[in-house]
Image: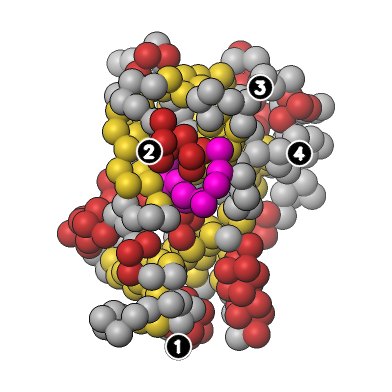
Amino acid sequence: MPTMNHKVAFSFADGKTLFFPVQGNEILLDAALRNGIKIPLDCREGVCGTCMGRCESGRYQMDYADEETLSAQDLAQRKMLTCQTRVQSDASFYFDFDSSLCGAAEPLALRGRVSHVELVSASTAILHLDASGNGQGLDFLPGQYARLRVPGSEAVRAYSFANRPNPQNHLQFLIRLLPDGAMSNYIRERCQVGDEIHFEAPLGTFYLRHITRPLLLVAGGTGLSALLGMLDELADGGAAGQPVHIYYGVRQAADLCELERIAGYAERLPGFRFTPVLSEADEHWSGKRGYVTEHFALAELRDAPFDLYLCGPPPMVESVKSWLEEQQLDHGHLYVEKFTQSNS
């Protein structure tokens, strides 16, 4: 009976991610080396800890780990040794050092063609790219981002994928439209179906981890993009039975986007809740007003550990961090993507 191959992602502290196949029952380190990923190593016997990483998602088993190398707490945190690990499903692993130590290549240089642009509001657009012409499937972890080169210029802008990987290589990006920005002006003035856009991917260490606790997803503006990719993954059976609550903060009702898509997650995710919050709502808005931290369910968060994924502009990120500290909610695990809004 043939053994099953698994797809594995190695993510590093410099934000790069490498994907490679692992054969059934193969030692993870051997598979990495076979695919040109030179993870630092020494003893290869589960003693030195040089090849240590942490499993962020997926199932695995270890043949051996010296108790002085990985403590019981380390094992509970899913730390592992690549020289002793065998994966039992598709999985992702994080290493707290730069990919350059592994002889890792630069992110893939790719291209896509504009298939559709939705002008959601005066401040937001959704760019759809068809990247099927690259001749290979594009791998990325939901939540990661790509660097897109603005056609007709040397300007490069970073945008989170707003969907999960798919065989067709159809990609989506939420784009904040600035009054005068390189990508914003291109979208408004020159963008045509069929335009070629070059980009690099995958990048970033903000992605969905192994799920064992309730999930709180918090988005500010186009920070929703990264969380949509995560929600696609969760809705496809990845929530592990845990409840999911997403808070979406924008200024005005016109800035809200993908509401129909978000409503669809409620049909596929038991325990799914959605709370939009407007900071500058008019008299016609009947929902939540102010800032997202004013509407967090404090009693609920105090009851049990949780994982919070936060993506938005720096002021919002700092506000949520401060709120968590003030409420002394140290049993929650915070994952952050603090994007820097370009002014041009």
Badge 1 element: helix
**Amino acid type, residue under disc 2 in the picture:** Leu
- Residue 176 lies in the magenta-colored region: yes
Residue corresponding to mark 3: 106
Which corner quadrant of the image does residue 88 belong to?
top left
Q: Give the mark toward the camera: 3 or 1.
A: 3
Q: Is residue 110 left or right of residue 267?
A: right
Q: How many marks?
A: 4
**Cα distance in 3D space between marks 3 and 2:** 25 Å
Separation of marks 3 and 1 at Cα, in angstroms: 45 Å
Question: What amino acid type should be assigned to the residue bearing mark 1?
Answer: Ala
Q: Is residue 318 magenta?
A: no
First reached walking from the N terminus: tag 2 or tag 4: 4
Residue that label 4 marks: 97
Q: Name the residue: 66% across, 22% down.
A: 106
Question: Is residue 233 left or right of 266 when viewed as pictured?
Answer: right
Gap between marks 1 and 2 measured at Cα:
39 Å
Q: Against 323, is 54 above or below?
A: above
* Residue 200 makes an appearance in the image: no
Q: Within 10 angstroms of label 2, few (less than 14), some, or many (20 or more) residues?
A: some
For marks 1 and 2, the one nearer the N-term is 2
Which mark is in front, 3 or 4? 3
**Mark 4 nearby-residue class (10 Å; few <14, some 14–19, many ≥20):** some
Q: Residue at x 46, y 35 (%)?
A: 186
Q: Is residue 89 above or below residue 332?
A: above
Q: Tell which circle, 4 or 1, labels the residue nearer the N-terminal end.
A: 4
Residue indicated by mark 2: 127
Residue 285: x and y in percent read: 29, 80
Q: Are marks 3 and 2 in contact (CB under 8 Å)?
A: no
| Gap in angstroms between the C-alphas marked 3 and 4 | 16 Å
Contact between labelled residues 1 and 3, with CB atoms less than 8 Å apart: no
The range drawn in magenta is: 171-182
